[in-house]
Amino acid sequence: MKVVVVGLGAMGLPTARVLAERGHDVIGVDRHGISAPAGSSAGETRIFRLAHDRPEDIRLARRALELWRELEQLSGEQLIDQVGLILRGEPVPAWVTAMRDEGLVVEELDAAGVERVFPELAFRPDEPAVLVPADGVVFARRGLAAIAAAARAAGAELAMPERMLEITETPAGVRVTTDLRVIEADAAVIAAGPWAEELLPPLGFSLPLVPAIGQVSYWRGGGNWERRPSLVDFQADGKMGVYGLPTPGKGYKIGLDYGDEAAWFSDATEWERREFEEECNREWVATHAPGLVTDGPYMTEGCPWTMTPDAEYTYGRRGAIVVAAGCCGHAMKFTPVLGEILADLAEGRELWPDAKAFALERIPAEMPFTRYDTPMGSRISL
Ligand SMILES: Cc1cc2nc3c(=O)[nH]c(=O)nc-3n(C[C@H](O)[C@H](O)[C@H](O)COP(=O)(O)OP(=O)(O)OC[C@H]3O[C@@H](n4cnc5c(N)ncnc54)[C@H](O)[C@@H]3O)c2cc1C
């Protein structure tokens, strides 16, 4: 089978790899390039976590961890660092139950526990906190480079910059027109990140997708900040959640559970620094992680994500076209397992039961988004 994969981010790139390894003829195209700053997969790191409140997510994350480990063996690079993850806030007990039901080891933290594992963090006595030791960080840029190398080794052509302009279905499959050529293929996979919002409706997929720009900042702690656990702080009283993770060489990365819809611009190639997030990040650090400081220049990075109303990514197939969309701030950790799922869809296979939980059919036409009462904020799911 010949397959064109449009978009080589965390969703499209592993799909190209798996399809090539299964013996298919694969052409992947990307208008910007792998890990380019315009897209959702830019940057060095993301949180890797088995921790979720849904069993399907936990099981898919376990499969992803196995596959990341296999890729480490293949590439000789460290791709996952299990520095641990702290979850804190009111949803924690429900998450602990779900995690224990799936056999995950978790350690509930009191003040002494927080001081031991993350001394820069202020303890909040009224809110539960838990450590998930198996979680931590995925080295996203390195991981995507390793996947690209494996895809090329299996015979995939990865072409960039090359922009898909149009896809039409033909009796034999699809005709994909790019700015450089016309490709006839049996099937196409469209994994265009935030650009899916404009690319999918002409193909008959009317998904509720909202691209929005998130901004992170980098901080440092005391002696060993690179070994601090990642963090999901749900926060109380309707305040925006905050996440954090160590990013070697740069600092401890802090970001908000928030995206600015008004800042999305489909022809942008990078993202301007914005004061609102900067102020929120500084305020959170001063109040909740006073041991973190900026030493050296204060650094920020912007990155687009794409919300669905239930804050989960989704995928599906109609005719010869497979789509994957809605990164929702947490798809990177699943990257290798998403490659398997999307390759199955491209081959016309039945999805396995855990993978069905995120299929297109689950999103009703009229599903409202949750928005914070902030300048055009849309919630993301950590
Ligand atoms: C600030 C932030 C923090 C995050 N934190 C985490 C985290 O801690 N843990 C985690 O697991 N995930 C996290 N995520 C989510 C994760 O990074 C995304 O889910 C993932 O990168 C999405 O990948 P994607 O392939 O859907 O999109 P993208 O990476 O955007 O890839 C889409 C690609 O399609 C290409 N494209 C678009 N249109 C065309 C066209 N017409 N022709 C050719 N190519 C095209 C683009 O150039 C782009 O490269 C975070 C995301 C953000 C933004």
Image (cartoon, grey):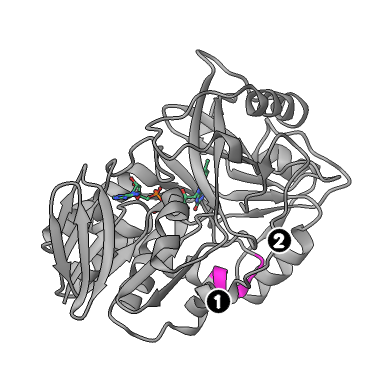
Residue at 71% across, 64% down: 95
Q: Nearer the viewer, residue 154 or 159?
A: 159
What percent of the width, then of the height, locates residue 128? 80, 52
107, 197: nearer the viewer: 197
From this view, report whether residue 101 is shown above or below residue 223.
below
Quadrant assignment for the N terminus: bottom left
Residue 368: mark:
2
Q: Is the magenta stretch mostly helix, strand or loop?
A: helix
Write down the quadrant of residue 184 in the picture: bottom left
Mark 2 vs 1, N-terminal side: 1
Circle 1: residue type: Ala
Instruction: Please report the residue visible at 52 percent of the width from the left and 62 percent of the height from the top.
Output: 313
Q: Which residue bears the numbered disc 1?
A: 357
Foreground mark, 2 or 1? 2
Q: Give the range drawn in magenta.
A: 53-58
Q: Say whether residue 171 is left or right of residue 10.
A: left
Q: In this view, does 89 lie to the left or right of 337?
A: right
Question: Neighbour class for label 2 at 10 Å: few (<14), some, many (≥20)?
Answer: few
- Asked if residue 66 can be seen in this view, the reply is no
Check disc 2 and report its element: helix, strand or loop.
Answer: loop
Which residue occupies the extreme right position in the image? 126
